[in-house]
Amino acid sequence: MAVRPLLITNPRLRKRFRDTINKLWRREGAKLFAYIEHNPGPPSRLSRSWRDRQADLLGDLVIASYLPYLRRWVRKRATRLHVRFSARTPRGEKARLVSERLTRRGWGHHKNIVYASFVGRKKCLKVGRSNVGLKRIVSQRRDVSFWHAGRVVLFFPKKRKRKVLPALECALTHLYDPIYTDIWPAQTKYGEKCPACRDTVGLRKLVEELFPT
């Protein structure tokens, strides 16, 4: 049985979603508007690049509708800790400082960690994960995402299930939308793919089928 996608209930997101669909249908049937409009203008060609941009926009709206669910999922399954840096903290020492502070607070023995580095209040630089504890974070001391970070948020899964770690990384990537995404995180969750990723992939395939170029 096919999995039903999440119903978008936010009125603002619903309007933007509907407007984008109307733009796709209008360009697909541009020549037909000559029968009902005096001056419909020259028909615009449905190019692949333009269609893909609309598909990306629709996908972003689907992700936005999932954010409240993902926030609840993260709060239920992980403990969150913060490490903040002063303006005088040397850039190359920030990763080591994270390890030292968490060890003093009694979290040094945990192996599974998902971390997110931020500059400013809300701009996320990177989301990453480690299954070898704080060693992975210390190895990032030369990474630009730590050099420019003003704070690091760390998430420790409350359960030791192997599938929770990549699922947590995927959820936080959707929530924080990091600048540096060299490798998209693994999407395994409950033996299935992340529901937000599943819906956006299915949506893109549907748009490609309905609006071939």
Image (tube, helix red, strand yellow):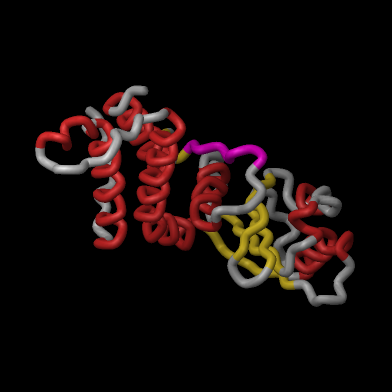
Residue, x 69% and y 64% (percent of image)?
A: 152
The quarter of the picture where the C terminus appears is top left
In the image, residue 175 sits, relative to residue 139, either above or below, namely below
Q: Is residue 53 left or right of residue 10?
A: right
Q: Is residue 190 visible?
A: no
Q: Is residue 166 above or below residue 14?
A: above
Q: How many marks?
A: 0
Please identify the quadrant where the N terminus is shown: top left
Question: Which residues are drawn in magenta?
Answer: 182-188
Return the x and y of residue 10 as percentages of the image width and height.
Answer: 27, 61
Nearer to me, 200 or 172:
200
Observer-nearest residue: 7 or 59?
Answer: 59
Among the 4 quarters of the image, the one containing residue 33: top left
Q: Residue at x 39, y 34 (%)?
A: 51
Residue drawn at point x = 50 percent, y = 56 percent: 175
Can you say whether 47 is above or below 146 in the image? above
Q: Position of residue 211 (x, y in %)?
A: 30, 28
Residue at the spot x=50%, y=38% of the render?
A: 187
Viewer-proximal residue among 166 and 22? 22
Q: What x and y, as percent, mark residue 160? A: 56, 47
Residue 82 is drawn in which quadrant?
A: bottom right
Please, what is the dominant secondary structure of the magenta stretch? Answer: loop
Magenta stretch: includes residue 178 = no
Task: Using the rendered image of the protein, determine whether residue 54 is visible from the camera's viewpoint.
Answer: yes
In the rendered image, the residue lying farthest to the left is: 36
